[in-house]
Structure formats: structure tokens, C-alpha cells
Amino acid sequence: MLAMAVAGTVNAAMLLVAAINLQGRETSGSIDGAYAAVHDTLGAMIAVLFAIGLLASGLASASVGAYAGAMIMQGLLHRSIPMLVRRLITLCPAVAILALDFDPTRTLVLSQVVLSFGIPFAVLPLIRLTSNRKLMGTDTNHPVTTVIGWAVGILISLLNMALIWLTVTG
């Protein structure tokens, strides 16, 4: 929970910094361009802090994902993979992409599109399960929460479909 809160706070701060200071800058369309734009606009120290914030946010998000995966494997599949092996398995695709010299910005965008594809498969069943009184008992969602959850889940799904369509069609 703490890692998610830190990652969310860092992401929100970076979005605010970027939105306020990089408006209208055409050079911020890539990772290198974003660093150069922050460096030119706010100075070297802020650019370094921005890069560290990106790294910290990514590490926190990866940690939360790895921890959630480990809990699911232990609880549902009754399997346990040593932490070092899990880290190596999740690190290999990133190292391979870097070694093959793919465009980092395009790769980042595509990875986020692929990740967003899975969101509806997690969110919509979660809403369905948490609104089931037989399954959840007294912890069932309030009907208003369920309606809001379905609306947000469907909106996220539609936006993800649009994102995938726009990415595929250019």
C-alpha cells in the first residue's frame, strides 16, 4: 500500500511539473526530448530529480506487481518462486529490449498499451465479485459503489480500446 501511495504521489507530481512547464514544447515527444525540455526549462537539478522520480515510480510499481503476483501464486496456486528468480524473470524482457536497441520511447508506449489491455480483465471481474452478496457477505459493495464501479470500469475499457486502436492505426 505504501509503495502504491509513493508511486501515485510521484506520478502526480511529475505530471503536474510536466503539464505546467512543458506546454507547447515540441521536443518533449521522446524520453530524451522530455529530459532536455525539463533541463532547459527548469534546470539540471530538476531534470535529474525528474529522472530519479521516474525511476523510483517504476521501481515502486514493479515491486507492487511482483508482490501481488507472488501472493496470487502462493494463495491460489500454492507455488512459491524465490524472489531472485522472480526478479530475473521480470528483468529479462527489459534487458533484451535494451540490448536489441529498440527506440525506448516507442517501446515504453507499446508496453503501456499492452499493460492497459489487461486492465478490464482485472477491473470488471473485481467489480462483479465485490458486488456479489453470497461471496462477500457483509463486505459487499454498496449499490452506489457498484454502479460507479461499473461506469468507471466500462469507461476505462472503452478508453483502452481507443488507445489500442490509435496505437495500431498510427
Image (tube, helix red, strand yellow):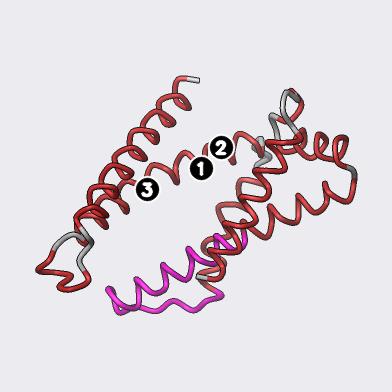
Amino acid type at image mark 3: Ile
Element type where label 1 sits in the image: helix
Q: Is residue 148 left or right of residue 15?
A: left
- Residue at (14, 62) in percent of width and height: 132
- Residue at (52, 37) in percent of width and height: 110
Q: CA distance from mark 1 to mark 2?
A: 5 Å
Element type where label 3 sits in the image: helix
Element type where label 2 sits in the image: helix
x then y, percent, for residue 72? 34, 71
In the picture as drawn, the residue positioned furthest to the left comes out as 134
How many tags in the picture? 3
Between disc 1 and disc 3, whose residue precedes? 1
Q: Quadrant of residue 6?
A: bottom right
- Residue at (45, 24) in percent of width and height: 166
Region of the chain picked out in magenta, as a range: 59-84
Label 3 neighbourhood size at 10 Å, few (<14), some (14-19), many (20+)? some
In the image, is residue 140 above or below residue 93?
below
In the image, is residue 19 above or below residue 71?
above
Label 2 neighbourhood size at 10 Å, few (<14), some (14-19), many (20+)? few
Q: Is residue 25 left or right of residue 11?
A: right
Residue 109 image label: 2
Q: Is residue 72 magenta?
A: yes
